[in-house]
Amino acid sequence: EAQVTQNPRYLITVTGKKLTVTCSQNMNHEYMSWYRQDPGLGLRQIYYSMNVEVTDKGDVPEGYKVSRKEKRNFPLILESPSPNQTSLYFCASGLKGTNYGYTFGSGTRLTVV
Amino acid sequence: GQSLEQPSEVTAVEGAIVQINCTYQTSGFYGLSWYQQHDGGAPTFLSYNALDGLEETGRFSSFLSRSDSYGYLLLQELQMKDSASYFCAVRDQYNFNKFYFGSGTKLNVKP
C-alpha cells in the first residue's frame, strides 16, 4: 500500500530533550515536506526536500532540523524542544513538480512540557 | 508572503449544496489547491485549479478567479461523511516548493 508513515503518533517530552520524528514513504517520491498544524493557523511548512541531500527552509523553520540521506526517509529533529513547539506535525511526499497534491502521513501529536 | 482567508465554520444539511470561499493576498502563485481533513486525520488532496474557471471532480467542484483573488470549493449532494475541515493552499510563484495553507473551514453537515 502506498503510504507515508510517521512515528511516533503521540509523544510527550520535556523541554530541552532532543527528539526525532521519523517519516518514511514507499512511493519513490522526490519531494518531501514537514508541516505543523496549530488551531486557527492551518498548516505551516517547516522544511522541505527536493531530493537526497537537498533541503530548504519553509515558513517556520526555527527550532527544527531535517536530513535527507535516503530518498524514502525525511526525519524531523528538534534539538532542544520548547513548549511553543507543542503541535500536530505532518509529513508529506509527492512527485517533484506535481500540481496534483501530496500524500500526507497520519500525523504526530507532540507535547513539550 | 502569502495570506489566505477562509470562513472558520460552515453548517449545512444533508443533500444540500455548500460553497467554501478562499480569498487570498499573494505576491504571485501557481494555482490553488483544496484539501480535506477529518478530525484526527491526515489532509487529503481534493482538487487543483491552475487556471481560472471551474474544475469538477464528482460531487466536488473548485473555482478560481485570479482577477478577483478568489476561489471556492463547491460540495454538492452533501453527505454526513463530508463533515470535515477544508483547506485552500497555494504554492509560491518564486519558489515552487513552498506551500501556504489557509486556516481551514470546518464544515458541519446535519441530518
Image (cartoon, coloured by chain):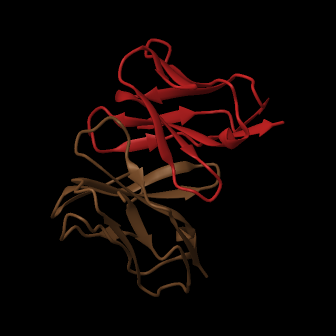
Question: Residue A34: percent from the left, percent from the top?
Answer: 39, 59
Let me know if residue B11 appears in the view. yes
Q: At 75% from the left edge and 39% from the top edge, which residue is drawn?
A: B108
Seen from the viewer's position, the closer of residues B64 and B23 is B64
Q: At 65% from the left edge and 54% from the top edge, which residue is drawn?
A: B39
The answer to whether A14 is drawn above or below residue A54 in the figure is: below
Let me know if residue A62 appears in the view. no
Question: How many badges with numbers are in the image?
Answer: 0
The answer to whether A42 is drawn above or below residue B94 in the figure is: below
Q: Quadrant of the C terminus of chain A?
A: bottom right
The chain drawn red is chain what? B
Question: Residue A109: percent from the left, percent from the top?
Answer: 56, 70
Chain A color in figure: brown
**Which quadrant holds residue A62?**
bottom left
Q: At 25% from the left edge and 46% from the top edge, which residue is drawn?
A: A95
Seen from the viewer's position, the closer of residues A26 and B67 is A26
Q: In this view, does B70 lie to the left or right of A32?
A: right
Q: In this view, does A62 lie to the left or right of B63?
A: left
Question: Residue B50: percent from the left, percent from the top?
Answer: 35, 23
Q: Quadrant of the N terminus of chain A?
A: bottom left
Q: In this view, does A67 lie to the left or right of A52?
A: right
Q: Is residue B31 left or right of residue B88?
A: left
Question: Residue A107: percent from the left, percent from the top?
Answer: 50, 64
Extreme residue in the front direction: A1
Extreme residue in the right direction: B111
